[in-house]
Image (spheres, rainbow, N blue to C red):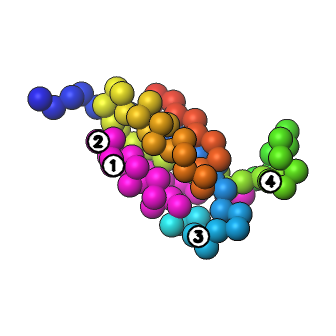
Amino acid sequence: MNPTKRNYRATFILDNRGKEDSVEQIIDGVKKEIAAVQGDVTAVENLGRKEFVRVTDRSFPGGTYVQIAFSAPQEGPAQLRERLRLNNSVYRTFVESV
């Protein structure tokens, strides 16, 4: 049975402080996680580094923002958030249906 896929746009704030991974390597890792939840990436847009309006951690005043458009089954975004929860290279995740 082939589940119906929906279109989503996810915004990620990446944290590569003290890591050897480049932003592109972290993005590739996120794309692999999307594929692991039966998702298909359609577009990737690196929005660049931006400073936070409200800084919660003084040692991390800003991060790299990336938007990824993908299609996945209905339970895909919840599974993706759970898979990325323990990934310390992804600081925040926001997934919206489009």
Quickly name the residue at label 3.
22
User: Vertical placement of 83 versus 50: above or below?
Assistant: above
**Residue 96 seen in the figure:** yes
Labelled pair 3, 2 in contact (Cβ < 8 Å):
no
Residue 35 is tagged as: 1
Identified at 59% across, 70% down, the residue is 22
Quickly name the residue at label 4.
60
The secondary structure type at the circle numbered 1 is helix
Residue placed farthest to the front in the image? 86
Q: Which amino acid lies under the numbered mark 1 shown in the image of this protein? A: Ala
The secondary structure type at the circle numbered 4 is loop
Reply yes or no: does residue 24 show up in magenta. Answer: no
Q: Dot 2, how many residues are within 10 Å of its Cα: few (below 14), some (14-19), or many (20+)? A: some
Instruction: Judge from the rendering whether residue 63 lies leftward or rightward of residue 55; answer left or right.
Output: left
Q: Earlier in the sequence, mark 3 or mark 1?
A: 3
Q: How many marks?
A: 4
Q: Position of residue 82 (x, y in %)?
A: 47, 36
Labelled pair 3, 1 in contact (Cβ < 8 Å):
no
Q: Earlier in the sequence, mark 3 or mark 4?
A: 3
